[in-house]
């Protein structure tokens, strides 16, 4: 029956191991405390030494910074003088350039004025030549009109002279025809009288003589009627000729009047064109003079603008810049000394096993005995034992709550609770 206390033996061994680990942990904690105290002492010594080194470095750095700031101040003062001298040189140069630019602007304006004057002269000369050309053209037109008018007058006089000559010729022809008719009529009367006398001289009497006389008179009458008809026809032809000549004269007068009117209109249009051209030339002259004035104004404005631009590029009179403030002494650095290390608290030794493992082993052994007893009863008594199972378990469980007023039992129950919740 050696297996009945196996749990208690195992618990005692676990208690020994626990106690041994507690001793080891206590020794280790003491070693760690000693090591930490040594390190704190070493760190304090290093901090003190580093503080002294930092003070020395800060002193050197402060001296270097002050010397550097003073050198920078001296260099800035020298640079101030150099910059002033450079500004004076640049100012003198800008003044020279300004004077040269103003002179150049004045010369450019003079050239612009001369160019505007030349352009005005050229344009006025062109207008003058246009006027002279217009005068010449008007004179030529007037001369051409006068020449054509004289030609029309000469042609009209010539036509009148020719018509007068034609009238005179027609009149002479008519008078000649009338004279010939008169002479022919007289000749016929003479011949008629001679024929009648001849018949009487022949001594013819009676009806035969009378018939011969009537025949002669009839022939003379026919001759007279023929002469009268010739005269009438000649007068009609004369009248028609005179009427034609008069109409030709009238038509010639109308054509001459029309040509004269055309020449008059042409002369009037020439005068109007000349007047219009003269007005245009006057307007052109006014425009030329106005353009000349604008060109002069523009030249003046350009000169003024160029002078303003040149003045804008001029530099202001140089002056010394104020001296920069001298560098101040740097404040001395304040360093805090390191704190002295404090002793660490003493290491407290941990609690031992207190026989917790052995007590738990005895509880396990008891539980095994009870379980074995319950199993035997269950096998022998069957269902009756089953009904009492809860009662037995309750009785056995009451062992766990046995009131043992000692530290060992408390530790055993505490370990049990921890294991149940782990």
Image (cartoon, rainbow, N blue to C red):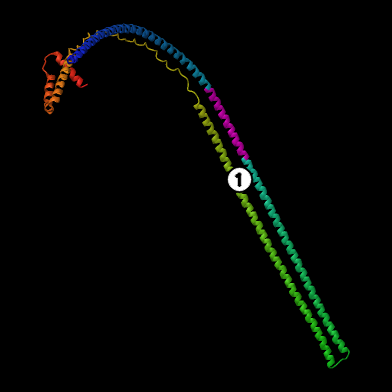
Task: Report the magenta stretch's main SS.
Answer: helix
The image shows a total of numbered marks equal to: 1
Residue at the far right in the pictured view: 202
Q: Which image quadrant: the N terminus?
A: top left
> Can the viewer see residue 413 in this picture?
no
Q: Residue at x 56, y 37 (%)?
A: 295
Q: Looking at the picture, how far across and down is residue 66, in whole percent?
A: 39, 10
Q: Residue at x 71, y 59 (%)?
A: 153
Within-10-Å neighbours for mark 1: few <14, some 14–19, many 20+: some
Q: Residue at x 48, y 17 (%)?
A: 83
User: Can you tell which quarter of the image residue 131 is in?
Assistant: top right
Q: Looking at the picture, how far across and down is residue 209, in whole percent?
A: 85, 91
- Foreground: 266 or 181? 266
The residue indicated by pointer 1 is 281
Residue 400 versus residue 157 in the image, above or below: above
User: Can you tell which quarter of the image residue 190 is in?
Assistant: bottom right
Left or right of 83 in this view: 384:
left
User: Can you tell which quarter of the image residue 204 is in?
Assistant: bottom right
Q: Looking at the picture, how far across and down is residue 280, in whole percent?
A: 59, 47
Q: Which image quadrant: the C terminus?
A: top left
> Can the viewer see residue 420 in this picture?
yes
Q: Looking at the picture, how far across and down is residue 201, in whole percent?
A: 88, 89
Q: Residue at x 57, y 28 (%)?
A: 104
Magenta span contains residue 118: yes
- Foreground: 3 or 238? 3
Residue 188 versus residue 59 in the image, above or below: below
Q: Which residues are magenta?
A: 94-122
- Foreground: 308 or 359? 359
- Foreground: 181 or 359? 359
Residue 180 versus residue 204 in the image, above or below: above
Say which element carries label 1: helix
């Amino acid at each position: 029956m050696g297996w009945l206390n196996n749990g208690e033996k195992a618990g005692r061994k676990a208690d020994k191991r626990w106690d041994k680990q507690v001793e080891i942990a206590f020794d280790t904690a003491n070693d760690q405390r000693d090591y930490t105290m040594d390190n704190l002492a070493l760190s304090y010594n290093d901090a003190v030494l580093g503080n002294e080194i930092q003070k020395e470095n800060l002193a050197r750095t402060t001296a270097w910074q002050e010397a550097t700031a003073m050198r920078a101040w001296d260099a800035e003062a020298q640079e101030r003088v150099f910059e002033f001298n450079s500004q004076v040189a640049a100012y003198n140069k800008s003044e020279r350039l300004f004077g040269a630019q103003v002179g150049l602007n004045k010369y450019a304006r003079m050239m612009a004025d001369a160019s505007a004057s030349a352009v005005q002269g050229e344009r006025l000369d062109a207008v003058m030549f246009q006027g002279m050309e217009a005068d010449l053209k008007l004179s030529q037109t007037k001369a051409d009109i006068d020449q054509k008018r004289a030609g029309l007058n000469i042609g009209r006089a010539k036509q009148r002279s020719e018509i007068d000559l034609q009238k005179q010729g027609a009149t002479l022809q008519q008078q000649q025809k009338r004279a010939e008719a008169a002479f022919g009529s007289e000749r016929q009367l003479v011949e008629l009288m001679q024929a009648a006398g001849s018949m009487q001289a022949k001594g013819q009497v009676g009806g035969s003589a009378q018939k011969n006389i009537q025949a002669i008179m009839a022939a003379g009458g026919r001759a007279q009627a023929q002469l009268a008809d010739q005269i009438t026809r000649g007068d009609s032809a004369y009248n028609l000729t005179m009427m034609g000549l008069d109409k030709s004269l009238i038509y010639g007068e109308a054509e001459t009047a029309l040509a004269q009117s055309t020449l008059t209109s042409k002369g009037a249009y020439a005068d109007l064109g000349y007047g219009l051209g003269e007005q245009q030339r006057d307007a052109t002259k006014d425009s030329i003079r106005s353009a000349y004035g604008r060109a002069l104004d523009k030249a003046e404005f350009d000169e003024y603008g160029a002078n303003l631009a040149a003045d804008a590029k001029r530099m202001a009179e140089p002056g010394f810049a104020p001296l920069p403030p001298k560098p101040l002494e740097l404040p001395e650095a304040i360093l805090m000394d390191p704190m002295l290390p404090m002793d660490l608290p003493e290491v407290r030794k941990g609690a031992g096993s207190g026989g917790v493992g052995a007590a738990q082993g005895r509880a396990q052994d008891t539980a095994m005995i009870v379980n074995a007893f319950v199993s035997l009863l269950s096998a022998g008594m069957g269902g009756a034992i089953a009904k009492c199972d809860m009662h037995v378990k309750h009785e056995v469980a009451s062992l766990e709550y046995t009131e043992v007023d000692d530290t060992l039992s408390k530790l055993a129950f505490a370990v049990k609770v921890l294991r149940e919740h782990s």
